[in-house]
Image (cartoon, rainbow, N blue to C red):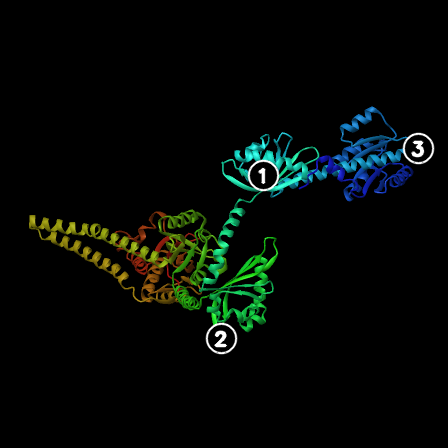
Amino acid sequence: MPTDSITEVARQLNGAGSIRVLHVDDEPGLADLVSIYLERANSDIEVVTEASPDDGLRRLAEADIDCVVSDYDMPRTNGLEFLEAVRADHPDVPFILFTGKGSEEIASEAISKGVTDYLQKQGGTDQYEVLANRIDNVVRQYRAEQEIDRGFQAMETAREGISLLDEEGTFIYVNEAYADTYGYDRDELVGEHWKLLYPDEHVEQIYDDILPSVPDTGRWRGESVHRTKDGDTVIVDHALAYADDDTLICLVMDITEEKRTERTLSEERTQFEVFVDAVEDYAIFSLDPEGYVTSWNTGAKRIKGYDAAEIVGEHFSTFYPDEKVAADYPDGLLRQALEDGSVEDRGWRLRADGSRFWADVVITAVFDDEGQHRGFLKVTRDISDRYRDMEALADQRRFIDQALDMLEDVFYVLDPDGRITRVTERAVEVTGYTQEELLSMDPTELFPADQRDRIRADIDEAFETGASRIEADLVTKEGERIPYEFRKRRFSDDDGRVVGVVGIGRDVTERDRRERQLQRQLDQFEHFGSVLSHDLRNPLSTVAGWVELAQETGELEHLDRAEVALDRLHTLIDDLSTVMREGELVGDRGILDIGECASDVWASLPHGSSTLRTPDGCEIRADENALTRLLENLFKNSLEHGGDEVTVTVGKLPNGFYVEDDGPGIPEEVRDEVFEFGYTTKGKDAGTGLGLASARQIAVAHGWELTATEADDGGARFEVTDVEPA
């Protein structure tokens, strides 16, 4: 840290080097003359000349200029306008107005616009020496101010604490590091006396011993005990010096921890030396800077099999297998230890008898108090037993990894920050992402945007409560959404610290499909129950009424009417049984091509002039006989209602297939009713409407959903969804 005042700093800048001057004057002859005399008057001055302010601005932008000298009276732009233009981009560069047209008004305006100096041209050549002196002065002052600014910037960013005190001992400046050393804000120290930072018992020593010694020697350095804002004691490396203006410069560096460490090391050094020789589980020995053994403990003798007399003076590469020595491995460890301070290593080592053992090694570079490298300390432990255990554990882990990769479920691990740290191959197969991509992703990125808050909350719940469960849609790399159930459980290390969450993700597509199938079957049973309770009740009531009337009157013709109602009841029961059996007849399922099945069914029906269109490559899993009956019922419906030349189309859906025609279609208000048992458009006595009810029963038995809607051209369209693909 410099100890000189600002004045001294400026004085030291004398002889700071060459001075490049930009001279702008519209008289070329005069400009050349000025350049010659200025360079003769001061050999440090180098003059570049321009004939117009515009050229001067370009030169100023392209070259390093220390000072601008400009005429006042020039065409188009005068010297003051040029000054304004210079100040816009170069606010601090010295600018001297050197003009033959002088007046107090021009001088005043030049000062207000930021001119550095003003000099009126005179007769004779002496004026150039004056101008050279003016240039030298303003440039050196400019450089001094820059140097001072840099000095203060350096103080602001210095790691050391720096403060300035006036003659009374009051702080007039402290940098951030100084204030932080004592726990104060800077504005809390400025204006306070230095005694604020000293314990009372140390203040007298400062006055009697330290401060008087500073003027005698020019500076003082030592250790001091200071007091922080909180009242704690801090030990600092402390330097004091006076500047020429009697400003006291103070530097401090907190060495509290360093001093405590020194005391601890001093107390422990003797104990350590005894301990090293007594330790038998570790080979502890020292090396010189080139790697030759200089000391050897009893543990080293036990582990490596050498007596100290046999090994001291040998290079430590003796303990490494030949292939390691050939690869420069041992010396590479020393270079790394010297660069990083220490290095850890694990691998095979050699004993004196040539046998190998698996070793855990730490090599530490050793330096003296002056920072001089003195060698290395090498600590070796025989962990052959642990190595064998680790190999066995590694085999177990490989087995576990293989077993986890065979799971149909997705297995994963999250770290305490909720990041993915482990996934099985099943996750790669399901999502389409690589292992590297999955490990770089936030878990929530694998789910739709509208579900991510739920996913994050579920992860947090697992960490907080120990376990969680959630169902959500897993989104693959291709954008496919798959319903999954995720179960997570928190796990901890032996010390009880939470180290992550493990989880299992299970595809519940089939489960959801079965649940939907069951629900549709339950709905169907409820519907049949309604039929039994409603549609059969009327015929039964009619029979009961006619029988009762026959009993009362004795007129047997009433029984004939009862018989008609019973016939109707038998018909309803037979039809209901037929529909119920449709679902029961769904058996083994195979891979079927919808187009081929549709063509076979169509060929068996009297379709007249009607046309069938079928898809290519649409395969599903279904019972062939049941699928045939379903298509037959749907085709019959189209042929019955679509007209003599109806066109029937079978097509693919993302999760099933459809059958549509170009007939009159089904009114929207009855599209749900057409599947009900007994629904018909032919009149009350024409039939019970079994076809579409049977088709839905077959669909429900497969686990499918059958719905009626409108075709693009207005005809009837039946969609079969939730179909298992081949």
Where is residue 657 drawn, in percent x and y? Answer: 40, 59
Whole-percent x and y of residue 336? 58, 61
Relative to residue 228, is residue 612 drawn left or right? Answer: left
Residue on which the image places disc 1: 178
Earlier sequence position, callout 1 versus callout 2: 1
Camera-nearest residue between 180 and 590: 180
Mark 1 or 3: the one toward you: 1
Q: Residue at x 59, y 35 (%)?
A: 206
| Alpha-carbon span between mark 1 and mark 2 | 61 Å
Q: Nearer the viewer, mark 2 or mark 3?
A: 2
Query: Residue drawn at (23%, 59%), measured in percent from left and top?
Result: 577
Could you classify mark 1 by the number of other residues whose Cα lies within 10 Å: few (under 14), some (14-19), or many (20 or more)? many
Q: Residue furthest top?
A: 104
Vertical arrangement, residue 188 with respect to residue 366, above or below: above
Mark 3, residue position: 124
Q: Which mark is residue 353?
A: 2
Q: Secondary structure at mark 1?
A: helix
Q: Secondary structure at mark 3?
A: loop
**Is residue 99 shown to the viewer in this render?**
yes
Residue depth check, mark 1 versus mark 2: number of the one nearer the observer: 2
Q: Amino acid at mark 1?
A: Tyr
- Mark 1–mark 3 Cα distance, whole angstroms, equals 58 Å
Residue 49, relative to residue 515: is it above or below? above
